[in-house]
Image: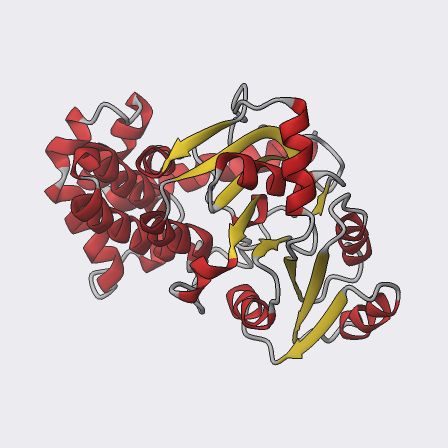
Amino acid sequence: MGGQGKKKQETYSEGQRELISIIVPVYNIMDCLPRCVESVRRQTYSNLEILLVDDGSNDGTEKLVDRLAESDSRIRVFHKVNGGSSSARNLGIREARGKYIGFVDSDDFIEPQMYGKLMECIHQEKVRIAQVSRDETDERGNRLPDVCIPPEKAYVCPAETFFRELLLHRGDCSYCTKLTERSLFDKYCFPEGVLNEDFHLLVEMLGEVEGIAVLPEQYYHVFYRAGSNTRKKSKDDFSRVFMDIVDNADMAERIAAKRYPGLKEEAVRFGLYQRLDYMLHIPVGKMTADNTFYAGVKKYLRHHLADTVRNRYLSRKNKAYLLLLTVAPRTVRRIHGWKMGRRAAVQQSE
């Protein structure tokens, strides 16, 4: 991304006149919310509004958001019946006044320069979406491996290339790392009642843009609560996220066939990988003939047996697991479950 220092400063000054709406869905998050909100308030880009959408909290957070609003006139609070993160985000979008929209999860926090740099990038590169990089820490403060490797330098990624990176599990589908033009949400919204919703919306929205500008700086900090969405309460508990990722894989294959036929192999790889994740998490007790979703996953694996063998984008380990799961799914799932249980026991004892 080129440009002289003087030009950047002029662009940034122009961008300061445009309002950014930052939406924070909130639900029973007393411990982390003050840090999150303070990190947004401290943005060097001051022309912003902060929308705290309380999604039916009942632990005192519903009162905390009102107290936080008293500390900054830019904060607006909305209370609603619990409906999930997508529902809260969609309400925030409807109420947003800004030309650009950002999202911050209530247990995360951001660097002061994040939205200033994103706005500067949008004006300089004339894009409708710009993205920073992110890092993750766990509850003990340990830095976790990067889920998405930051680029060496800033660049504009064409929409088709960005879609390919998502299919190869190298791209960042999170809207929390992005600043997005408000008008893009006129046609699309977050799907409600499902998980993996950011991926679903982004692959649809990619058809409306030429590309996404990506910055290497890790200005967004994810606070990882172990298993927050996929946590198991019993051996038969099974998060719907593993079904939603399969549904999203099917959607991605349809979009690839329509918009990017050259990405067929990557799209099939994505479909196989997501089903591998499903098969390695579904409880053995749910692997029954009357489970239509499970039966559909098995049918897909059998139908794509040759693709599993030939696909250039699957590792040998992926291929081995997929082939074994196609032949003897219940046995492989039992063995994998036993191995994961042993590993967890070792980690807890350390």
How many numbered discs sit on the rendered protein? 0
In front: 276, or 81?
81
Q: Residue pushed farthest right?
A: 71
> What kind of colouring is applied to the model shown?
secondary structure
Judge whether 194 appears above or below 324 on screen. Answer: below
Residue 346's image quarter? Answer: top right
Residue under the point 46% across and 34% down: 339
Q: Residue pushed farthest top?
A: 152
Residue 103's image quarter? Answer: bottom right
Drawn side of residue 327 relative to residue 8, left or right: left
Judge whether 270 appears above or below 289 on screen. Answer: above
In front: 248, or 144?
248
Residue under the point 60% across and 53% down: 102
In front: 168, or 153?
153
Q: Residue pushed farthest bottom?
A: 81
Image coordinates for residue 310, horizontal then vertical, percent: 15, 25
- Does any portion of residue 251 appear in the rendered image? yes
Drawn side of residue 206 relative to residue 328, left or right: right
Residue under the point 29% across and 39% down: 270
Judge whether 347 appears above or below 95 on screen. Answer: above
Q: Quadrant of the C terminus?
A: top right
Judge whether 165 appears above or below 188 on screen. Answer: above
Image coordinates for residue 303, horizontal then vertical, percent: 11, 43
- Does any portion of residue 236 appear in the rendered image? no
Drawn side of residue 105 relative to residue 194, left or right: right
Image coordinates for residue 63, horizontal then vertical, percent: 81, 74
Image coordinates for residue 173, horizontal then vertical, percent: 46, 44
